[in-house]
Structures are given as structure tokens and as C-alpha cells.
């Protein structure tokens, strides 16, 4: 028997959602979404160039970054609304490459949009019913046999009414979606997304254009998604909101992932400060960009 000893491997540091030190592309303990080498260009402009990123399961992850960072484009690529030039990505172990948006949704990955996509000439109730998947009545043959789909239709109606009640929209169920306020449309889009019992909900700037009176309601609903066992990935510019509800933060700048970590540490990361502050040196700031920079300054001051 040899006197040589087998070297003991160094234990892997695991902290909460991730393995090892927080850094762009850090390995997650239980990732639900993984993207590798995803790149999208428009002419000579590289909008997205993500080497590797993993989204932790069962957590609320915020995707932040200055205007033009590529966040919404990345959302579009992951959900089948746009096609990358190269790369691969998978959801819950299944490849999403070349999978159209409607099939991605059927797999359990649902998204909302910065500009809501409610069908204005349909009622709120009809919008909700469109979100249910696997409806027997959508089949041409089965549609002429009411006894096949009627029970399912009743169950869908009951589920829609329950969700509308939860989102305080039940009184609006017979109103046309076009009559809703911007904030109410955001609520409707989120409620409709839940009709399909998603595993991962992706929210593109859920607070954009929302009346402050509805902001807390939306925040509560996002937190409620997590409590129901769903994973949430959202794009947001409101840094105070991010710090309040996010478990993990991913920062994009110029199409790349430049930082990852918990909200407390990310707000002090030099790469994040540079992305929000340094990117604006010697340039004219628009009102929105100025607000983002000031919010980041306030958060940095608070953390210190």
C-alpha cells in the first residue's frame, strides 16, 4: 500500500444562492435559467454580449443598469421575442434556442412588458381567460362539443375571478382593458401571467408609469410571487425598490454583465458605480438618467 496521501480537495464556498465569491457569471446553488455566450448585434452595435449568467431558483433577482445597457433586449432573447446571433440558454434544464415565444410561455417562463400588452378591445375578464393554457375549446373539433370543454371553462372563470380579486381588479372585470389606468394595466398583465401557473416570471420595468398609489400594491404582489414558490427576474431602475425586495442583483452595462451580488454589496461595487456615474462623464444627462444617478448616489451614501 502506497505511503502517498491523496490530496484533499478544497471545500467549495457556498453562500446562500451562490457558490464562491460574487462575480459576473458566478455559479448558483440551484439555477433555473442559464445563458452562455449570448450575443446580439444591430449593425455595428453590440446590444447584448453575455458570457455566462445563472438565475437562482426561488429568489427575486433584479437586472439593473443604465439606459441602453441591453436589459430589455436580453429579456427578449431569453423569452423568444428576438433571436441572438450566437449563444445558448436553457430554462429548467431545457434548451430555449430556436423555441418561439408562445412555446417558451407554455414551458412555464412568462414575461410582462414595459409597455403593457393588454388587449384593449377585450374585457378585463377576457384578457385573463386568454392567459390560461391547454384550453380544450381552442381545438376546432372539441369546440363544437360543449360537454368536453364546459367544465374546464368554469374552472378557468373561477380562477380568473380569484386572481382579479387578489389584484383588486374584480370590479373591473366587465370593463374594456383600454379603460384601465397604466398601473391597473400592469396589475392586469401580472394577473394574466399567473393564469398559466408559471415557474419563472420575468417583469420588464413593472413600476414604469405606475401611479405612486399603486406602487406598494405591485411590490406586495411581486413579493407574493416568491412566497408562492415562483422565481422572479425583473428589470428596474428604482434602486430603492431593488434594495427593498431583491435577493440578488445582476448589473448590465454596454451589453455585458459587470457585477452580481446581494443588493447591499452591489450598491458599493466600483463597477456598478462606474456604470451609473462614470458612463455619464462629459455627457448631457436626460431627466431619467439624472434621477438614476442621484438615486445611486443616495443609496451609496446610505450604505456608507
Image: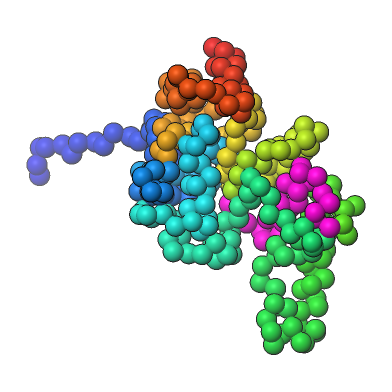
Magenta-colored segment: predominant secondary structure:
helix
Q: Residue furthest left?
A: 2
Asked whether 220 or 227 is in front, the reply is 220
User: Residue 200: percent from the left, percent from the top?
Assistant: 58, 52
Which of the 4 image quarters holds residue 139?
bottom right
Identify which residue is drawn at 66% across, 59% down. 197
User: Residue 238: percent from the left, percent from the top?
Assistant: 63, 30
Which of the 4 image quarters holds residue 107?
bottom right
User: Residue 216: percent from the left, percent from the top?
Assistant: 76, 34
The image shows residue 46, relative to residue 243, as above or below, that is below
Q: Does the magenta-highlighted stretch encompass residue 200?
A: yes
The image shows residue 251, relative to residue 160, as above or below, that is above
Identify which residue is drawn at 54% across, 28% down. 263
Q: Residue furthest right?
A: 171
Residue 113 falls left or right of residue 166: left
Asked whether 146 or 118 is in front, the reply is 118
The image shows residue 303, relative to residue 46, as above or below, that is above
Identify which residue is drawn at 38% across, 48% down. 43
Screen quadrant of the C terminus: top right
Residue 270 falls left or right of residue 236: left
Does residue 265 show up? no
- Residues shaded magenta: 176-201
Asked whether 161 or 100 is in front, the reply is 100
Residue 10 falls left or right of residue 149: left
Q: Does the magenta-highlighted stretch encompass residue 304?
A: no
Screen quadrant of the N terminus: top left
Asked whether 291 or 149 is in front, the reply is 291
The mark tally for this picture is 0
The colour scheme applied to this rendered structure is rainbow
User: Residue 234: percent from the left, percent from the top?
Assistant: 59, 42
Amino acid at each position: 500500500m502506497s505511503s502517498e496521501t491523496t490530496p484533499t480537495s478544497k471545500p467549495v464556498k457556498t453562500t446562500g444562492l451562490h457558490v464562491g465569491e460574487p462575480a459576473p457569471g458566478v455559479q448558483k446553488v440551484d439555477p433555473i435559467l442559464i445563458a452562455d455566450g449570448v450575443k446580439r448585434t444591430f449593425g455595428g452595435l453590440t446590444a447584448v454580449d453575455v458570457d455566462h449568467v445563472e438565475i437562482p431558483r426561488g429568489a427575486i433577482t433584479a437586472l439593473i443598469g443604465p439606459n441602453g445597457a441591453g436589459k430589455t433586449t436580453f429579456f427578449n432573447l431569453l423569452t423568444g421575442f428576438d433571436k441572438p446571433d450566437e449563444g445558448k440558454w436553457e430554462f429548467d434544464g431545457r434548451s430555449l434556442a430556436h423555441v418561439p415565444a408562445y412555446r417558451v410561455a407554455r414551458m412555464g417562463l412568462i414575461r410582462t412588458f414595459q409597455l403593457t400588452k393588454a388587449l384593449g378591445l377585450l374585457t378585463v375578464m377576457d384578457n385573463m381567460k386568454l392567459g390560461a393554457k391547454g384550453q380544450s375549446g381552442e381545438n376546432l373539433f372539441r369546440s363544437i362539443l360543449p360537454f368536453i370543454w364546459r367544465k374546464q371553462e368554469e374552472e378557468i372563470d373561477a380562477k380568473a375571478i380569484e386572481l382579479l380579486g387578489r389584484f383588486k381588479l374584480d370590479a373591473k372585470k366587465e370593463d374594456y382593458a383600454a379603460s384601465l389606468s397604466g398601473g391597473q394595466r400592469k396589475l392586469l398583465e401580472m394577473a394574466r401571467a399567473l393564469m398559466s401557473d408559471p415557474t419563472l416570471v420575468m417583469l420588464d420595468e413593472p413600476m414604469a408609469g405606475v401611479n405612486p398609489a399603486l406602487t406598494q400594491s405591485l411590490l406586495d404582489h411581486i413579493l407574493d410571487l416568491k412566497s408562492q414558490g415562483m422565481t422572479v427576474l425583473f428589470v428596474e431602475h428604482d434602486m430603492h425598490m431593488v434594495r427593498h425586495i431583491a435577493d440578488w442583483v445582476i448589473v448590465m452595462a454596454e451589453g455585458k454583465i459587470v457585477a452580481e451580488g446581494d443588493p447591499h454589496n452591489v450598491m458599493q461595487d466600483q463597477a456598478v458605480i462606474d456604470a451609473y456615474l462614470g458612463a455619464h462623464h462629459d455627457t448631457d444627462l436626460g431627466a431619467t438618467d439624472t434621477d438614476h444617478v442621484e438615486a445611486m448616489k443616495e443609496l451609496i451614501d446610505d450604505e456608507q
